[in-house]
Image: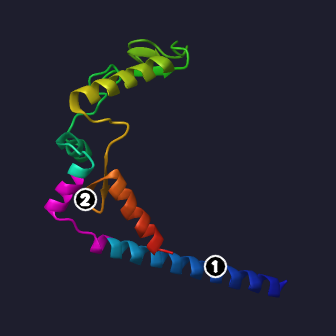
Amino acid sequence: MKTDTKSRIITVSIITFIITLAVAAAIITDMGVQKDLTYTDGELQELYYEYGITENDLKFAKGELPNYLNDTVLVGNRVIVTEDGLPPENMELGVDYDLVLSEREMEDIIENARVDYIKKYGVDPANPKIDSVYGYLLPKAEAGRIMESASDMSY
């Protein structure tokens, strides 16, 4: 019994050590990618041109455009969404909520707001063109390439 316990402790220790080494290697690799990742303003402009990134795409990524739901009833009101659009029996209009919507109504409001936002700003809030990687705002394809190469290096 004591030998079995010793074997388990040794096995757990070895596994813990291997996991620690793997995590340390991944951290070191990521730090190397971050340290080595640099773009000049000119290179960023070329990427933005190549991928059709607009000024509004950049503003959206920086959080400088308003939220696409701002002008809907979903913001600034106490809204309850239920499957059928009927209020729960234990809640009172004007006290617990201001408006009850069905799930379908809510989805329609969100989709219409998204369409209006795309028309107004040219940015799809459900599918932005930019990701932030190590402080750089990059087109999704470029960001994916970098993250893929970083994960390849960690093996």
**Residue stretch rendered in magenta on the structure:** 34-48
The kind of residue tagged 1 is: Ile
| Magenta segment includes 13 | no
Residue 10 is left or right of residue 88, and the answer is right
Q: Position of residue 113 (x, y in %)?
A: 32, 24
Q: Which residue is mark 2?
A: 136
Q: Is residue 7 left or right of residue 54?
A: right
Q: Quadrant of residue 2?
A: bottom right
Q: Which amino acid, by three-letter code, is at mark 2?
A: Tyr
Residue pictured at 63% horizontal, 79% vertical: 15
Compare residues 65 and 102 and report the one nearer the observer: 65
- Image coordinates for residue 63, horizontal then vertical, percent: 23, 43
Residue 117: image location, x then y, percent: 27, 28
Q: Nearer the viewer, residue 82 or 147?
A: 147
Write down the residue under mark 1: 15
How packed is label 2: few (under 14 Cα within 10 Å), some, or many (20 or more)? some
Mark found first going from the N terminus, 2 or 1: 1
Disc 2 element: strand
Tell me if residue 38 is in the magenta stretch. yes
Q: Main secondary structure of the magenta part?
A: helix
